Image (cartoon, rainbow, N blue to C red):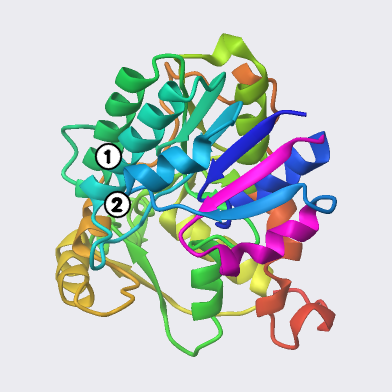
């Protein structure tokens, strides 16, 4: 029975990975900053099969302790915005290097690192630059590492669809970022232009399965995979999809990048900002799988469409909840 250490195993992707590992019969060590908050993961396996332990990837000693005796290691730790000591270079670059270095020193057989589509050293976003730097440090320390770059991930605990679905419960417009100002064309008035930034949402279960495949298959060693769903959507189309499956009507308001940048700047000072200036910079670049990349298909996985998962996933946000009578929108 192999021992697998999962850093960040209590997050939305991590809990899916832990569940699949437990189903395989692996011994799972979940390395998190607060083990008490991760005790719910123990129910995903047999007695003693899943064990939360304390580790902070900013602290190399705790990382080394978490990988002692491990056969396989997965690093899922990442942040969407900076707060206090949690800075992009510290968590997503230095932290990734700490995990990879410790895994190599411990003689780990396989290592999977989760990055993100858009990771680039030349990106205007500090988040994307730190992800790219993290990939480089991981491959330097552990050349056989498999790196996965998902697009926006959707699932029961995601921070995109659930956030906007929760926002739809209030009688306020939903934003469509990056679509430009309304303009008149030969085809008529285009309020949302091209619909804003494009995304290729990928289901959390497919991402978790991709991680398992990389742990099992040595042919993925040293390779980078970009993970996206079967369909590409504009920001506007995603908002419409959320409203469709929450059975609500809300106006959509186009927000050009110039206005979004100002919003992100001021919201960034909030304790838990819903938008930051760095996130606006990320939105300036489409979040889709490139034509030349290795994908889920190369891992033998058929991605599930958002239209299949969202109806059940977002029913909590409907007026009346999951038992509300279904009516045509």
Find numbered disc 1 in the image and state the secondary structure of the residue it sits on. helix
Viewport quadrant of the C terminus: bottom right
Q: Left or right of 221: which side holds 253?
A: left
Q: Where does the image place residue 77, in percent across and percent down from the top left?
A: 43, 48
Q: Verify whether residue 35 appears in magenta.
A: yes
- In percent of the image, x 33 and y 36: which residue is there? 98
The magenta-colored residue range is 25-44
Please give the residue where the numbered disc 1 appears in the rendered image: 93
Closer to the camera, 326 or 50? 50
Please give the residue where the numbered disc 2 appears in the rendered image: 283
> In this orientation, does residue 17 appear?
no
Q: Left or right of 20: which side holds 242?
A: left
Q: Where does the image place residue 62, in percent across and percent down from the top left?
A: 41, 47
Q: How many marks?
A: 2
Q: Left or right of 229: which side holds 324?
A: right
Quadrant of residue 118 within the rendered picture: top left
Quadrant of residue 100 within the rendered picture: top left
Viewport quadrant of the N terminus: top right
- In percent of the image, x 67 and y 20: which residue is there? 216
């Amino acid at each position: 029975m192999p021992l697998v250490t999962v850093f960040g195993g209590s997050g939305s992707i991590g809990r899916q990975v832990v569940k699949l590992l437990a189903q395989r019969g692996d011994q799972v060590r979940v390395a998190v900053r607060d083990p008490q908050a991760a005790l719910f993961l123990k129910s995903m396996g047999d007695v003693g099969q899943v064990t939360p332990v304390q580790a902070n990837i900013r602290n190399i000693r705790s990382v080394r302790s978490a990988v002692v005796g491990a056969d396989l290691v997965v690093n899922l730790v990442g942040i969407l915005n900076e707060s206090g000591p949690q800075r992009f270079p510290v968590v997503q670059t230095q932290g990734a290097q700490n995990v990879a270095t410790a895994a190599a020193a411990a003689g780990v057989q396989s290592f999977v690192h989760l990055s993100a589509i858009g990771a680039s050293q030349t990106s205007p976003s500090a988040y994307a630059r730190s992800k790219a730097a993290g990939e480089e440090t991981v491959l330097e320390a552990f050349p056989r590492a498999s790196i996965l770059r998902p697009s926006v991930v959707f699932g029961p605990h995601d921070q995109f669809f659930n956030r906007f679905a929760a926002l739809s419960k209030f009688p306020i417009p939903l934003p469509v970022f990056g679509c430009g100002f309304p303009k008149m064309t030969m085809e008529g008035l285009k309020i949302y232009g091209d619909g804003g930034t494009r995304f290729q949402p990928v289901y959390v279960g497919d991402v978790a399965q991709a991680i398992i495949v990389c742990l099992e298959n040595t042919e993925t060693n040293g390779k980078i995979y970009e993970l996206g769903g079967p369909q590409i959507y504009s920001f506007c189309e995603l908002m419409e999809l959320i409203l469709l499956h929450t059975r609500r009507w809300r106006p959509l308001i186009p927000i050009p990048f110039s206005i979004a940048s100002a919003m992100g700047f001021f919201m960034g000072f909030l304790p838990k900002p819903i938008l930051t200036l760095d996130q606006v910079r990320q939105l300036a670049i489409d979040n889709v799988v490139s034509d030349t990349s290795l994908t889920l298909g190369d891992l033998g996985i058929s991605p599930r469409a958002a239209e299949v998962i969202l109806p059940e996933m977002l029913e909590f946000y409907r007026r009346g909840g999951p038992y509300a009578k279904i009516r045509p929108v």
